[in-house]
Image (cartoon, rainbow, N blue to C red):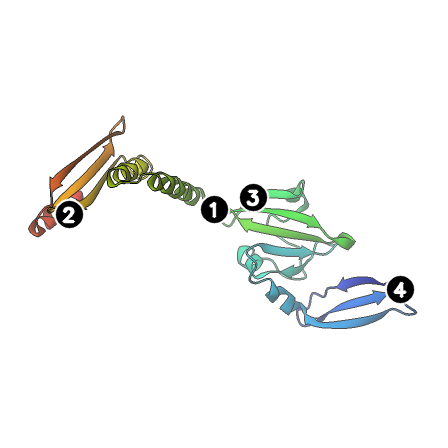
Amino acid sequence: MARQDIRLRSDPDPHVEATVVASGGAADAPVPVGIPASITAELLTGVEQAIVVQDPASRVRLLSGRARELFPSLAVGAPPTGVPLTESAAGDGHFEAEHGGRVLRGSCRPLPGGWRGWYVTEAPAPARAAAVGFLLEAARQIATPVDLDGTGRAVAKAAVPVLGDCALVLLPAPRHRLEWWCCGGERLLLTSGRARAPSAGLAPVLSAVLG
């Protein structure tokens, strides 16, 4: 049986069906797959990565839904402009760049026939990354103690100095009392104690003081 080479022909017109060409027989004959290029792009909508495919002339031939969100200036059939998807940006195949107020990380993968595919993700903002790191560390510290006192101490210590210069943890105790833990100051000293729970009439006063 003759060897068959399969290649996919992409068309910039989203209404033109993709075509698979089988060669190696007596005569080459295009066989329509029946999947419009627009459907191909829709199949990638659920993918978190932004995917951009370029032909050998560097024209964009395919955009995923996420790619359209990150790069609204890109258009199918035109070279990319104003975006970090260039040969110099690809470097060794990986890149990191800032675009539209976002930090983007991605890779460029060579495809058969001189085509290339870009796979891009949005990196977490520094503030968000710091917050995630704090939550993970705080969760680790809070999960370690097995009693109320240890938990109160862990919560007070975890909050300083990430969330503020001083942290006060109040937890209800038996007989209408409150247990408290406080961490702060230049040396981050931790103190604790128990006090009588304030009456309901004192709530507005405390709110004004703490506000």
> Which residue matches tag 4?
24
Give the Cα distance between marks 4 and 2. Answer: 82 Å
Locate the N terminus by quadrant. bottom right
Q: Position of residue 150 (x, y in %)?
A: 27, 37
CB-based contact (under 8 Å), mark 4 and mark 2:
no
Q: In terms of depth relative to the viewer, which is nearer, 46 or 110?
A: 46
First along the sequence among labels 1 and 4: 4
Report crowding for label 1: few under 14, some 14 to 19, many 20 or more residues within 10 A (C-alpha): few
Give the residue displayed 66% in from the left and 41% down from the top: 91
Residue visible at 65% across and 66% down in the picture = 40
**Amino acid tagged 3:** Ala
Residue annotated with mark 1: 124
Q: Is disc 1 in contact with disc 4, using a CB cutoff of under 8 Å? A: no
- The amino acid marked with disc number 1 is Pro
Disc on res. 97: 3
Looking at this view, is 155 or 211 the one in front? 155
- Chain-order first, disc 4 or disc 3: 4
Is the Cβ of the residue at disc 3 closer than 8 Å to that at disc 2?
no
For residue 126, what is the image quadrant?
Answer: top left
Give the farthest residue toward the right: 26
x then y, percent, for residue 31 = 79, 72
How far is mark 3 from mark 2, CA to CA?
Answer: 46 Å
Q: Residue at x 56, y 44 (%)?
A: 97
Of label 3 and label 2, which has the lower sequence position? 3
Q: Which residue is mark 2?
A: 207
